[in-house]
Amino acid sequence: MFDNYDRNIDYLRVSVTDKCNLRCKYCMAEEGIEDSSHANILTLGEIVGLVRVAACVGIRKVRLTGGEPLVRKNITKLIAEIAKIPQICDIAITTNGMLFADMAEELSAAGLTRVNFSLDSLEADRFRYITSRGNLSDVVRSITKAMEMGMAPIKINTVVMKGINDHEILAFVELAKKMLLHVRFIEFMPVGNLPFYKTDRVVTVSEIREIIEHKYELYKGAVIQGNGPAKSYQIRGGMGTVGFISAMSDHFCGECNRIRMTADGKLRSCLFAKEEFNLRLALQNHASNETLADIFSKAIREKP
């Protein structure tokens, strides 16, 4: 399915919950958010049905997100049902890693193909400060488990914030050099807990690269599966890669191939789009699959 700018939109990000077991300072306030009742979010059956419709209009890849997707009850069953949809060839998840290690084998058996870990510090105390309550050892155990199981590619998403974790940039590069991991540095952007966002905390991709290239030689290498907006580079003499997602300084909108579905059934063609398409309301009105497909098609065609 091509949008009006000839981008092939084949990737659906599905938020399965707005709940999270961490309180990362840039994402969610310590008190959390008002809980959505089960009556206000999509059931697992509704999610599967909507993904099935999306597959009929060209969606081939699905990523499950949150909040923290692994706190959603029966997430493994959801993955197994999505895996049965013939057109879907890739099911990935983005997780903070707190619960992944103990669930990894059943997730993989259900059909999970790839995993991204959100990790903003390799220092235990700093990690606790950023997340407000997390234990770094739990995330390390999860990443290790994914590596032991041969899941690939394993990506580490790191939001760089000046004065908070920018001193760890080289430590993350060293991690990617020594292990078959793909570290992606993400510019700090104003989402989630907006009072925490300050422009002077933004470290641009060009600044991050300058720090890295004082010590490491980067060069263009193999394309990484599901690479999305990241511009990735091999590290001379290293096993993994580093990538850069320039969310603020150099927008990647022209290359975006995704649409997003929220836990309460809203379809967005862009993370920052004001317009939403209410799939849940359509379901409540007993819309046919043809009508739902038209909604997906409209969202894709009108993607900004």
Image (cartoon, grey):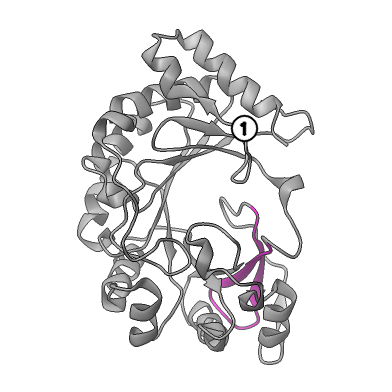
Task: Name the residue located 62 percent from the left edge and 32 percent from the top edge.
Answer: 275
- In the figure, is residue 146 to the left or right of 152? left
Is 231 part of what is drawn in magenta?
Answer: yes
Front one among 166 and 108: 166
Residue that protrudes farthest toward the bottom in the picture? 215
Magenta segment: 229-246
Q: Exactly how many numbered labels are in the figure?
A: 1
Q: Quadrant of residue 249?
A: bottom right
Estimate the x, y position of residue 281 in percent, counting from the top left.
43, 19
Task: Name the residue located 48 percent from the left edge and 31 percent from the top edge.
Answer: 266
Q: Amino acid at mark 1?
A: Glu
Question: Is 257 above or below relative to 249?
Answer: above
Q: Mark 1: which secondary structure?
A: loop
Residue that protrudes farthest toward the right in the picture? 5
Front one among 53 and 159: 159
Residue highlighted by disc 1: 275
Estimate the x, y position of residue 289 in percent, counting from the top left.
46, 11
Quarter of the C terminus within the rendering: top right
